[in-house]
Amino acid sequence: MKKNMNKFLIAFLAAAVTAPAATEWQTQEKLNAKVDSINAKRGVEIGGKIRAIAQTSYFDTDQDPNGTSDMPETERNEMANADIDFHFRPFENVRANVMLRMGAGMQEYFSSASKTLSVGWLNVEGNIGKDFYWVVGDFRQQYTPLTLFSPDVEILYEPLIFARKRHMAESQELLDGNQRNLQGANVQFRHYFGSAVGELRVEALAARLNRTSVLDLSAAEGNILPNDSVAGASQASNMDKWVIAGNLELLPMDKNLYVGVTPMYIFDNKDSRSYTYRHQGLFVGDPYEMQDINPFEIDPQKTTIVSGRVGGDVAGILGNKNLVLDLVAEYAYSSDETYKHEGVPVIDMTTGLPAVDEEGNAISQDVAKKKTLNGSALLVNMNVGYKMESDWGVVLGMDIVRNDSNWFNNLAQSPKFFARRILNSDIDGETIKYGVNSPLYSSFDALYNYSPKFSPVARTLGTDDGALSSGQSKSYNIAPFNKSSWKSNVYTRAQLALIEQMSDPALQLSLPNGLATSNRQGGRGNLKFNWKDYAEVQAMGSYFMQVSALSGYKEAKYLEFGGGAKVDVFKMLGFQKPLEISGSYKHSERKIDTDGWGDLGLTDGTAELKSDFINAGLYVQYLPRLGFTAGFQYIKTDYNTYEGLSTGLKAPLMSGKQMQWMVGLDYTLAKDAWLSINYGRVSVKNEYNTAALVADNASGNFEQPYNLPSYYDVTTDASGKFKHEFSQAIVEASINVEF
């Protein structure tokens, strides 16, 4: 406790630039006095996380010589957060937990309005004896990949310098592994009945997933596609969404056999349905009318999931501590109520003919027809290998998946990562809502950068009465908002479908929603070999295909393979400090044969997408706590003509090359406690097929596509191909301390 408190107070003093200077011994005396004071209060514990970052990104391109874009090319993000955890134990078996988040923007440090104080986590928990545990308030929970789970992005041997950035971005959103953040009540009972019966685990939870909330349909916060009207565009909720779940597991024979059942019920509380007033047609000039809070998703969710699983640890039954041999098979069933809306003509009761309005237009009423979709999912996991205590080990892990197209469980399918535009977003501010299709998007920017409170620049600086409206962006309002690709949201069916269309193919191609991804069958394997803690080598491969084909196509096929390794050279030579070198390569591809395109006057073919992802990292400590980190990443993606046609874009991407490198110095106290100063660069080269735009321009029908930069000039495009290159130079200093 005393050591953790010292780490916290040292980091906090270092981050607070307004703290008065003091000699080393005076500071230490104050720290010791503070620690003794806190420890003297029985029943009180303090922990938390401190994050501070100062980051500047310089955008550069040679393809805008005329200055078509007049937006700022430099973005500065400076912030400091202190998530302080207070644990109060008024009774031996009861504890109250409060996390206070204190934040400030360093560039406005002396402005009180820029400081924030919020309660990020609040619960009361306790236990009755040794077997029963309960919690009310905020909590985290995961069961299995098909029931309650938060899918993540998997990067093989991710360089440490980038992994740290991703860790800070996820911590900012309170994410922790594959656990899902919930708010409600959770009770757990566990009892060991002896070697024969084993351990019994009984769990139950009730949590609110989303509350009735009115959100601005044109804002960046709470919308997937601001200012758009497609299903799933807004995350506003007409009703409170809840989940009630139970989990029963029995582990007999010294916990070497496994039987489990998990029922779940996800529903919208119809009694909480609310409405709001908006302009008719969402146009400011029209009069107000009462509307659904989310007019694009008005139907309630009612989903039932039941999962059953069995498994066993053969090595444990045999009593062989060196052998690895276990198997778990899970089958899940889902039943989800969906609705199809149709406009039915209204009949005039006096004439018996279709009714018309004052302008002679037919009047229709919306009729919703309910349809229940029953789906299933199967997941088999097996691990086979052999380990020689701490010397060496080799393990093969395999997953077999068979999820049909009707399978649905948004508590297992909602991903943590939804690719967004982050740095230098003022430049392409009108189009950043399109994520991967935004002209300045890069996978590295989406993965590793974030800005908790970004203040965008107005699109125009006019002073007339209409300047406020004309200065807004189609992707956000001119007001501070949180830029991050990492969220803990539970999405609806329509939102998940929209997010899958906008997923990053270099990161989420085959299983965008994890092992619970619907309409997939196939398998994957991972072979890992380790030699003590000196070296580790992995090889992976997967093959999946769709269970049911989409309209106009045959079943898509997904292939991935790759491998990597990491070696700690210094440990092999007997040194205590690390010199770790790592690297990996992964190839991903998707092939889809078209079907029936001849009816549209086109020739059937194969839509093909290929992507290669390379990682290389270096970390070395050359003094007791000082270290040097370096990382390199490269992504190359190719799209053939049919893949471009399948996107529906007028200027589809033909190929893309993304490269990122970064170097830095760090002062490391522990695994999750460091101060680092880094410099890096992101370079992107994209080539687009613009033949359709050239033809439209010749016929006088040209419209600027949202996936090309504003400085694209069709009048100078003679080849029907546009090569776009840009780069971002990033300078950053960060502090991360967890205690």
Image (tube, rainbow, N blue to C red):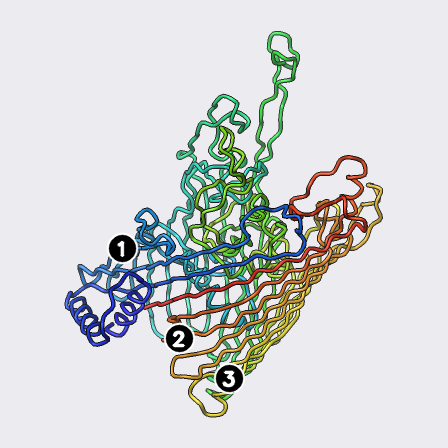
On the image, the x and y values in percent for residue 184 come to 35, 50
Confirm or deny contact between disc 2 and disc 3 (CB under 8 A): no
Q: Position of residue 250 (x, y in %)?
A: 41, 65
- Farthest residue toward the front? 66
Q: Nearer the viewer, residue 263 or 407?
A: 407
Q: Position of residue 700 (x, y in %)?
A: 78, 35
Inspect the image, locate mark 1, and give the three-letter code of the amino acid beneath it. Answer: Val
**Up-down: is 446 above or below 34?**
above
Q: CA gap, disc 2 to disc 3?
A: 19 Å
Residue drawn 46% across and 87% down? Answer: 390
> The residue tagged with tag 1: helix, strand or loop?
strand
The Cα atoms of the two marked residues, 1 and 3, are separated by 43 Å
Q: Which residue is mark 3?
A: 568
Can the viewer see residue 302 in this picture?
no
Location of the N terminus by quadrant is bottom left
Closer to us: mark 1 or mark 3? 3
Position of 387 relative to 122 (above/below): below
Q: Residues within 10 Å of mark 2 (few under 14, many from 20)?
A: some
* Residue hosting label 2: 667
Q: Amino acid at mark 3?
A: Asp
Task: Look at 44% across and 81% down and name the residue there.
Answer: 621
Residue found farthest to the top: 350
* Numbered mark located on residue 124 in the image: 1
Q: Is residue 618 visible?
A: yes
Left or right: where does residue 498 sit relative to residue 314? right
Question: Identity of the amino acid at label 2?
Answer: Tyr
Image position of 320 with respect to 519: above or below: below
Q: Is residue 363 left or right of residue 143?
A: right
